[in-house]
Image: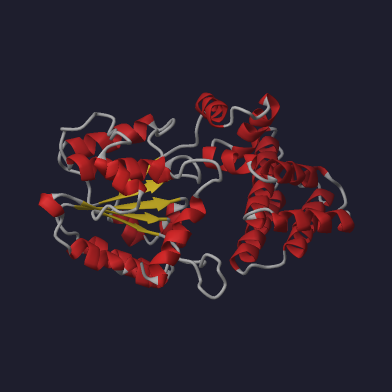
Amino acid sequence: MSKSRAAASEAEEADRIEGQAHPRETYDVIGQDEALARAARALRSGRPPQAWLIAGPPGIGKATLAYRIARYLLRHGATAEGPADLGVAPNDVVSRQIEAQAHPGLLVLKRLVNQKTGRLKTVLEIDEIRRLASFFGMTAEAGGWRVAIVDSADEMNDNSANALLKALEEPPPRAILLLISHAPGKLLPTIRSRCQRLDLKPLDEPHLAAALARLLPDAKTDDRAALAHLSEGSLGLALRLAGEEGLALAREAESLLGGERPDVAKIFALGDRVARAQDGLAHFGRFLAQGLSRQIRARAMQGQGDARAVEAWEQINALYARATGLHMEPRQTVLSSAQAVASAKRRGSF
């Protein structure tokens, strides 16, 4: 394996949640019956689209569904020969090859690791997307299918997006492109128009509670309830919260929203904790924005909507997006967000 492909393999594992199966190793699509049924009808009818845009918030099963579609196509093709729920057994040769990242009919495109920094690159670059041309140009074995998964399409830059658009404009036979997107509105309209949407929804409380009870059997009942509340229907986020300092950081975010005046020493100590946690800055920013969003919605339901609170929410989202993209110092980022929250509270925004 070349150094660049080895880096790609490392990068692919960046979306693995510690102690949990990777989406390519996950065989149950939880709480997405409607989307799964739509995909099954299209595949089993023999007329699947050239591309699916699998859309929805992070952590709700989009990649898991993409791999389920891939397994079925690579095992049964676009036929009704397989199960109606698109299930392929874990011990099937196709499943084993996909788990080993060794199936010749599947290409997965993700951000690579920067060899100089050892960190994931911030964008999915054009050279990765250009791999589609040679992959789709290959002759599939025994008249089979070729499946490409882009995870996620949101991470493409302009050049990557234009290269992807070219692939969509010249679709080969017996090939399908599965684009995973957390924010499809940010994609080029020309990309969206060439894909069929497959929308997934946040998990409802019964599905989320059952999944957490099964996957986190040793967690306290109160902790699982807190995870369900904080994750807002995202099983992936709930599982990430359960590891390391995730739940503690989420509770710190809630506490910060409830405080009146930031204590700089405590904020800096919090910033140090954020820095120590894996992807801590990105997660803390998400927890903070979600907590603020819940407060805004609650006030709106009471007829107390305030545009300044929405501005604070936008400011915090922009602050953490910039900080994570540029690998900025966590303590100053946390302090700046605490000051933004305190300013909004002084104005009576929430």
Q: Nearer the viewer, residue 196 or 126?
A: 126
Report the quarter where the N terminus lies: bottom left
Q: Residue drawn 71% across and 49% down?
A: 309
Q: Quadrant of residue 112?
A: bottom left
Answer left or right for 305 relative to 238: right
Q: Residue 102 in the image: state x and y as whole percent.
A: 30, 54
Residue 43 location, quadrant: top left
Residue projecting furthest to the left: 143
The reply to whether residue 305 is visible in this rendering is: no
What colour scheme does the image use?
secondary structure
Q: Residue at x 67, y 32 (%)?
A: 226
State the quadrant of the C terminus.
top right
Provide residue 7's location: percent of width, then percent of height. Answer: 45, 66
Q: Report whether 332 appears left or right of 198.
A: right
Q: Is residue 110 visible?
A: yes
Count of labels in the image: 0
Q: Residue reaching furthest bottom?
A: 116
- Compared across the picture, whether 48 is left or right of 162 comes to left
Q: Nearer the viewer, residue 156 or 261?
A: 156
State the residue in front, 208 or 105. Answer: 105
Q: Position of residue 321 (x, y in %)?
A: 61, 61
Q: Is residue 318 above or below residue 54?
A: below
